[in-house]
Amino acid sequence: MKTNALIEKSGTGTDCLNHRNHINHRNHSSDCLNHSRISRKSVILLLLLCLFIGNVQATVRYVKAGASGTGASWANASGNLQAMINASASGDQVWVA
């Protein structure tokens, strides 16, 4: 009789064997699936967190015709679009009215 010996790495670092090779197969299979889901959720959460942290540091510069400010807010908007583009780094935003 052949036994499937599929081994999956779980999120906790322990091996999850096919339920045929384990005494308490129902709970063990469920645990393996839960570890796999936790691992995927953790990776997705980590990626979203990295994206959020990257966007938190972004600067918004404001530009509108006839303004003469620094571009730090709409009330203090700059009138020079090219200067705001030049002052921006990757991930920054330039809003134009």
Image (cartoon, rainbow, N blue to C red):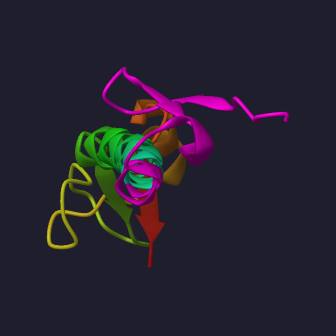
User: Is 86 drawn above or below residue 96 in the view shown?
Assistant: above
Q: How many marks can you see?
A: 0
Q: Is residue 35 magenta?
A: no
Nearest the viewer among 97 and 91 is: 91
- Which of the image's four quarters has the N terminus? top right
Q: Is residue 16 magenta?
A: yes
Nearest the viewer among 56 and 61 is: 56
Residue 28 seen in render = yes
Q: What residue sits 47% from the left and 52% below the top?
A: 29
| Residue 23 percent coordinates (x, y) | 41, 42
Q: What residue sits 50% from the left and 53% below the top?
A: 81
| Residue 27 percent coordinates (x, y) | 35, 56
Q: What residue sits 40% from the left and 71% below the top?
A: 64
* Residue 21, quarter of the rendered image: top right
Taking the view exactly as shown, the residue that stands out farthest to the right is 1
Residue 80 seen in render = no
Q: What residue sits 29% from the left and 46% below the top?
A: 59
* Residue 84, quarter of the rendered image: top left
User: Is 68 drawn above or below residue 6 in the view shown?
Assistant: below
Classify residue 65 as left or right of residue 6.
left
Residue extent of the magenta highlight: 1-30
Nearest the viewer among 78 and 12 is: 12
Taking the view exactly as shown, the residue that stands out farthest to the front is 1
* Residue 18, quarter of the rendered image: top right
- Which of the image's four quarters has the C terminus? bottom left
Taking the view exactly as shown, the residue that stands out farthest to the bottom is 97
